[in-house]
Image (tube, rainbow, N blue to C red):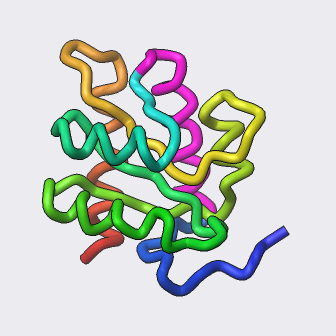
Amino acid sequence: TAEAVNPKAYPLADSQLTITIMDLVQQAANYKQLKKGANEATKTLNRGISEFVVMAADTEPLEILLHLPLLAEDKNVPYVFVPSKQALGRACGVTRPVIACSVTSNEGSQLKSQIQQLKDAIEKLLI
């Protein structure tokens, strides 16, 4: 079900990119390189350990996470919206909907190259 996606939710990933993002979020969760929730994501940005931030476009009200793009831009961290908080929650490995999550950096991580590819893809959206 495509909820009314808020026009403020920019940039929104297309279906192909969404699948890639969910996939990497899932792996990041397995590697303990994932912080779930708007507050945790904010903390990773402030601490400078965030690789990129994923937010759900069907968050109600969306304003509760619109501080994240501003902070991410300040810190030069790519961010992207995905259509569904329910799907994001599943990718994060929890049963609850997740409105925001942050993939954190980890030296010597197996995910480094995938994270880099995805960051490039997200940055293309922001141009």
Measuring 18% from the left and 36% from the top, which residue is drawn there?
A: 47
Which of the 4 image quarters holds residue 26?
top right
Look at the image and say whether residue 11 sits in the magenta stretch. no
**Residue 4 at what x, y percent from top left?**
72, 81
Q: Residue 33, relative to residue 61: is it above or below?
A: above
Q: Would you say 126 lies left or right of 25 here?
A: left
Tell me what residue is drawn at x 55 percent, y 72 percent: 62
Which stretch is magenta?
A: 15-32
Q: Report the residue at 63% width, 65% height from top.
A: 59
Q: Residue at x 19, y 17 (%)?
A: 107
Q: Residue furthest right?
A: 1
Quarter of the figure that contains the N terminus: bottom right
Q: Determine whether, in the image, residue 15 is placed left or right of residue 76.
A: right
**Magenta stretch encompasses residue 23:** yes
Does residue 25 sit above or below 33 in this rendering? below
Between 116 and 63, the residue placed more toward the observer is: 63
Question: Which residue is nearer to you in this view: 98 or 22?
Answer: 98
Place of residue 46 in the rendered image (x, y in percent of width and height, measured from the top left) = 20, 44
